[in-house]
């Protein structure tokens, strides 16, 4: 693309810039600013240097060269200095425009087409061919200037909207002298522009709008990252996502795909008869999961409230109230650690169906993921971080016991009831693969069920690359799941794993109110024991995942169960992780537009 060649040009020496300058644009810039300006150059460079080569070079000349450990600090200082110099120049342009009666921050603009629509409508134009000048071929577009270059009486701008890019062909003969001079003097990369004209394809094959008139809709004050280097600072990309999306258009594509995935999830579950409902974010008791909640204080009520850690318990109340199929797509908040897989706020879909069990939720999980994969990628074989994943149904279904036996050779059904003896056998069998922290975790297990789960998480889980349903979890770690019909000590629960990551969690829901109270009370008792131990351990350095928070029973939920909840299955599926999988994103921060970050120093 002709205009996009500018992106590969970095800041040129000032003498080269002046040598290429046209006399007419130089005189205009000198008249406005009292010195030579970057607008005198027929070649527009990268945004970081485009607004003031003089200011940039002056700053460089005044700053002594740095070496060694001071180089990075000096570079940062220069960058900040250049940025402020460019901002100062652009603020002067705003004043100049208003002085000429032109408002650089418009109220609206009537668009007739998007860039992508024009590319499709006029793809038939041959090189050098221009469309009819009749009113039916007059177009109006708007977008951000991402590249520009000028050659005397001719200027090229590349305009980007949310559909793509289109070139603006600005010829002095087609627009007024005043507007052409304004274009050269006032328009910078990053500005938002509206333009009207007719269509043509240049001799070099670039579809373009022959501009008859234009208007500055928003004057950008800060320079964009240059195209050659881009926005590569990972922390800055997350912290200033709006700049990230401008500099790296593929980032915005991830969020378009995310929206499509959420839409497809809704379409899939609603076609099966589910009703979308909304449940409270602020709750009196944080239930439905075992996680540290965020706590706030309601002044009028004079009480603590918690940001929800799950939507489960209120959705089950809807079943008690008579609804048979409900779901909610909502934000969940957990005051825990941050990693490539975890963000303190994340999005899930939780769904509940009366008169069904966990087998039906496996079918639903398969349907949701495959429908989303087809909607986004058009196929069921995808690449994730260099690994080929096959989403063709049906997916593997295997019990936790069998998967542990398959990977370790340990048959938990033969270990007996002696927990200490079982731990010794596990440590002996896995002594060559366990790290010190894993051995510590096994030593801390309070039951055979916890031990089985610990071995599964350490040894088996990372190996579950292809879609796998892991069935029949121990009752000790599944307080909301129904007891297994055929295996004492287990529950009717599954988790879905893809690429070694949990994607979904589902149960045949526990409906016995007495059993439910007993299990939740035991969960609180175990948590309080851990909490007491944590408070005694004063040397603990990392409290991101400690147990110092308070856990309370949701008495209203237990009351609801006593009115009677029908047999039901329920599932929670992590939307962020699903988007990661289907967009080949390595970190959860890549699929959350504005992730939580540490305070910038």
Image (cartoon, rainbow, N blue to C red):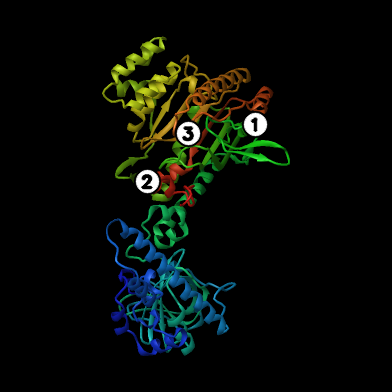
- Residue at x 50%, y 41% (from the top left corner): 344
**Marks 3/1: CA distance?**
34 Å
Residue that mark 2 sits on: 586
Q: Regarding mark 1 in the picture, which secondary structure is present there? A: helix
Residue 388 on image: x %, y % = 30, 42
Residue 555 on image: x %, y % = 66, 26
Report the number of numbered marks.
Answer: 3
Sequence-first disc among 3 and 1: 1
Number of the label disc, if any, that sits on residue 317: 1
- Residue at x 30%, y 69% (from the top left corner): 8
Q: Quadrant of residue 429?
A: top left
Q: Mark 3 or 1, which is nearer the eye? A: 3
Number of the label disc, if any, that sits on residue 377: none
Q: Residues within 10 Å of mark 1 (few under 14, many from 20)?
A: many
Sequence-first disc among 1 and 2: 1
Sequence-first disc among 2 and 3: 3
Residue that mark 3 sits on: 543
């Amino acid at each position: 693309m002709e205009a996009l060649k500018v992106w590969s040009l970095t800041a040129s020496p000032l003498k080269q810039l002046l040598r290429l300058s046209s006399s007419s644009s130089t005189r205009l810039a000198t008249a406005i600013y009292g010195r030579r300006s970057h607008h005198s150059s027929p070649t527009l460079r990268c945004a970081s240097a485009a607004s003031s080569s003089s200011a940039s070079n002056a700053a460089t000349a005044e700053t002594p060269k740095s070496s060694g450990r001071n180089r990075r600090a000096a570079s940062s200082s220069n960058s900040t200095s250049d940025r402020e110099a460019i901002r100062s120049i652009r603020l002067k342009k705003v004043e100049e425009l208003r002085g000429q009666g032109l408002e650089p921050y418009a109220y609206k603009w009537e668009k007739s087409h998007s860039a992508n629509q024009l590319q499709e409508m006029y793809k038939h134009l041959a090189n050098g061919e221009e469309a009819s000048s009749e009113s039916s071929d007059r177009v109006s577009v708007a977008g951000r200037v991402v590249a520009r270059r000028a050659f005397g009486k001719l200027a090229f701008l590349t305009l980007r909207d949310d559909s793509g890019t289109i070139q603006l062909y600005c010829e002095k003969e087609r627009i007024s002298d005043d507007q052409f001079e304004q274009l050269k003097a006032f328009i910078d990369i990053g500005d938002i522009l509206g333009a009207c004209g007719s269509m043509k394809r240049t001799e070099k094959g670039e579809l373009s709008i022959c501009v008859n008139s234009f208007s500055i809709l928003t004057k950008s004050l800060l320079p964009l990252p240059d195209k050659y280097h881009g926005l590569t600072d990972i922390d800055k990309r997350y912290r200033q996502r709006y700049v990230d999306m401008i500099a790296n258009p593929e980032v915005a594509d991830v969020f378009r795909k995310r929206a499509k995935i959420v839409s497809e999830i809704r379409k899939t579950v609603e076609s099966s008869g589910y009703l979308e409902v909304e449940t409270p974010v602020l709750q009196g008791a944080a239930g439905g999961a075992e996680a540290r909640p965020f706590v706030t204080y309601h002044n009028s009520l004079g009480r603590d409230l918690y940001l929800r850690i799950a939507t489960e318990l209120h959705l089950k109340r809807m079943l008690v109230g008579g609804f048979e199929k409900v779901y909610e797509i909502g934000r969940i908040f957990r005051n825990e650690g941050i990693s490539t897989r975890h963000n303190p706020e994340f999005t899930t879909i939780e769904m509940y169906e009366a008169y069904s069990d966990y087998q039906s939720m496996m079918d639903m999980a398969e349907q949701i993921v495959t429908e989303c994969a087809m909607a986004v990628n058009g196929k069921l074989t995808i690449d994730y971080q260099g690994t080929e994943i096959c989403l063709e149904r049906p997916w593997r279904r295997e019990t936790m016991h069998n998967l542990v036996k398959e990977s370790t050779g340990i048959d938990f059904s033969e270990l007996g009831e002696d927990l200490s003896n079982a731990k010794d056998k596990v440590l002996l069998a896995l002594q060559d693969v366990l790290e010190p922290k894993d051995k510590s975790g096994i030593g801390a297990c309070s039951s055979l069920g916890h031990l089985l789960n610990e071995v599964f998480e350490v040894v088996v889980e990372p190996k579950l690359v292809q879609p796998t349903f892991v069935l029949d979890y121990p009752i000790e770690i599944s307080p909301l799941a129904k007891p297994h019909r055929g295996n004492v000590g287990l529950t009717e629960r599954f988790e879905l794993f893809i690429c070694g990551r949990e994607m979904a969690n589902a149960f045949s829901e526990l409906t016995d109110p007495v059993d439910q109270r007993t299990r939740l009370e035991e969960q609180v008792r175990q948590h309080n024991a851990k909490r007491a131990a944590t408070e005694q351990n004063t040397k603990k350095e990392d409290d991101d995942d400690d147990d110092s928070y308070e856990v309370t029973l949701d008495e209203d939920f237990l009351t609801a169960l006593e009115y009677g909840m029908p047999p039901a299955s329920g599932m929670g599926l992590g939307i962020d992780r699903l988007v990661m999988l289907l967009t080949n994103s390595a970190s959860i921060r890549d699929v959350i537009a504005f992730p939580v970050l540490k305070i910038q120093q």
